[in-house]
Image: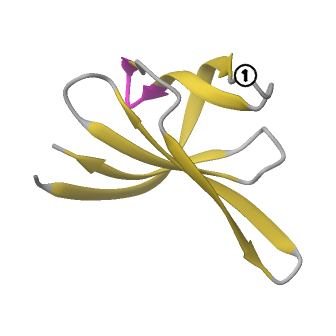
Amino acid sequence: MNRVTINEQVSITQLGFKKNLSAYPRRMEYKGAVYNFIDAGLSCLVRSGEQMAQIITLSDGQSFYRLRSDNHGGNWTLLNIFQ
């Protein structure tokens, strides 16, 4: 599996909700392409001092995408694509 490092901000255009009502990305737009994710993926919270971020790994059925949220719901960064 090849890893491509991106580290660019993306637009999340649709959110889904887990059973505990926590939100996760369902659709992402990056460089004019739309990616639809098939499940809630794996996630963890990372804390550095006063700042907290959520790291989540999602799949569209072909590749895996690792995203980071600022944990305020507005800014998402595409960290890596695994193909």
Q: Is the magenta stretch mostly helix, strand or loop?
A: strand
User: What residue is shown at x 19% (from left), y 27% (from top)?
Assistant: 62
Tag count: 1
Q: Is residue 62 above or below residue 55?
A: above
Q: Position of residue 23 (x, y in %)?
A: 72, 29
Outermost residue toward the bottom in this view: 49
Outermost residue toward the left in this view: 1
Frontmost residue, 81 versus 10: 81
Q: In this view, does 5 lie above or below 50?
A: above
User: What residue is shown at x 79% (from left), y 39% (from top)?
Assistant: 73
User: What residue is shown at x 37% (from left), y 42% (from top)?
Assistant: 65
Q: Where is residue 75 in the image (x, y as percent from the top left)?
A: 70, 44
* Residue pointed to by mark 1: 19
Q: Considering the numbered disc 1 on the image, is that residue within a helix, a strand or a loop?
A: loop
- Residue 31 part of the magenta segment: yes
Instruction: Report the span colored magenta.
Output: 29-35
User: What residue is shown at x 79% (from left), y 28% (from top)?
Assistant: 20
Q: Position of residue 17 (x, y in %)?
A: 70, 20
Q: In which quarter of the image is the C terminus?
A: top left
- Residue 27 part of the magenta segment: no
Frontmost residue, 58 versus 69: 58
For this view, does 24 lie left or right of residue 28?
A: right
Task: Decide: few, some or many residues near mark 1? Use Cα within 10 Å; few <14, some 14-19, many ≥20.
Answer: few
For this view, does 7 lie left or right of residue 74?
A: left
Q: Residue type at mark 1?
A: Lys
Outermost residue toward the right in this view: 50
